[in-house]
Image (tube, rainbow, N blue to C red):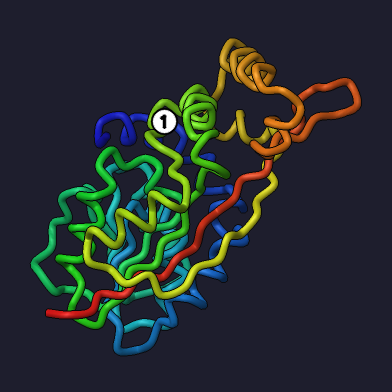
């Protein structure tokens, strides 16, 4: 997971740094509302990328740390923090499945648009639990498969576009895995995204061959399945965009 994700995002860091979908997309205000950050919080943003969530948290918390495996993404995050004169945010290299922090370091952990890259989501959840203090919370925003039956098709579609994609899990899997990690599922919302096909493929540096493969994969679905998968076709049946359901969930760490 680490090497594949680092290679993908180091190669396309400049695009992610200027992407409004990632910088200020509709999941961000929902995540901030569910997180309810305060000046007492020491926050950690996992797989921070170019720092969008960490930097959004910074004005509301005591301190925030962003970790990521892609050094080029972190360079953009540090540059933006300096430009915006945010002195309470730091960025460092770190793996979501082996966080480089002692137990109970943070009161708030976030991760936005990233867990579908994590090979072992159970390890990430266990690490988030470990670095949180009792009474802390984990707030996640990540794309989900619309149904369990469509996950295999969706994962192939996503992986063709971005080889660092691992799994676009349905909400049922998130509920089971978070409960197994000890978290209380406190509240959640599903935020709809509409992603134009041209932008979506350019964002990850798709070649014409990859674009053709994505269109061919989309064509394997019948009309009803394509609608269920969120595909948007023009009058000629040409793929123009797709809807991406984004789960935003607050998980609370109760107990010792």
Image quadrant containing the C terminus: bottom left
Is 13 rendered above or below residue 255? above
Q: Residue at x 59, y 14 (%)?
A: 213
**The one of 60 and 218 positioned closer to us in this rendering:** 218
Q: Residues within 10 Å of mark 1 (few under 14, many from 20)?
A: some
Percent of width and height locating residue 28: 54, 65
Percent of width and height locating residue 52: 47, 60
The image quarter in which residue 226 lies: top right
The image quarter in which residue 168 lies: top left
Would you say residue 245 is visible in this rendering? yes
Q: What residue is shown with label 1?
A: 11
Q: Secondary structure at mark 1?
A: helix
The image quarter in which residue 199 lies: top right
**The one of 84 and 215 positioned closer to us in this rendering:** 215
Is 135 rendered above or below residue 168? below
Total numbered labels placed on residues in the image? 1
Q: Residue at x 23, y 79 (%)?
A: 254
Image quadrant containing the N terminus: top left
235 sits left or right of 170 in the view: right
165 sits left or right of 132 in the view: right
Is 256 rendered above or below residue 161? below
**The one of 77 and 148 positioned closer to us in this rendering:** 148
Q: Residue at x 22, y 66 (%)?
A: 182
Q: Residue furthest right?
A: 235
Percent of width and height locating residue 196: 71, 38
87 sits left or right of 23 in the view: left
Would you say residue 64 is visible in this rendering? no
Q: Residue at x 67, y 22 (%)?
A: 221
């Amino acid at each position: 997971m680490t090497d594949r994700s680092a290679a993908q995002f180091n190669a396309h860091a400049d695009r992610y740094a200027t992407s409004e979908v990632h910088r200020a997309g509709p999941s961000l205000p929902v995540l901030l509302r569910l997180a309810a950050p305060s000046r007492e919080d020491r926050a950690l943003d996992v797989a921070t990328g170019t720092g969008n969530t960490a930097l959004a948290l910074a004005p509301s918390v005591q301190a925030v740390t962003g970790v990521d495996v892609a050094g080029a993404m972190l360079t953009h995050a540090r540059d933006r923090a300096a430009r915006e004169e945010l002195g309470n945010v730091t960025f460092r290299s770190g793996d979501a499945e082996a966080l480089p922090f002692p137990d109970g370091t943070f009161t708030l952990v976030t991760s936005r648009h990233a867990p579908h890259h994590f090979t072992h989501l159970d390890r990430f959840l266990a690490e988030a639990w470990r670095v949180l203090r009792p009474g802390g919370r984990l707030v996640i925003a990540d794309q989900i498969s619309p149904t369990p039956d469509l996950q295999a098709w969706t994962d192939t579609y996503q992986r063709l576009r971005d080889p660092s994609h691992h799994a676009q899990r349905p909400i049922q899997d998130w509920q089971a895995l978070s409960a197994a990690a000890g978290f209380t599922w406190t509240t959640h919302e599903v935020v709809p995204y509409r992603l134009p096909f041209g932008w979506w493929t350019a964002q990850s540096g798709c070649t014409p061959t990859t674009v053709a493969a994505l269109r061919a994969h989309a064509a394997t679905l019948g009309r009803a399945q394509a609608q269920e998968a969120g595909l948007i076709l023009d009058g000629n049946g040409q793929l123009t965009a797709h809807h991406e359901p984004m789960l935003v969930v607050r998980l609370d760490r109760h107990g010792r």
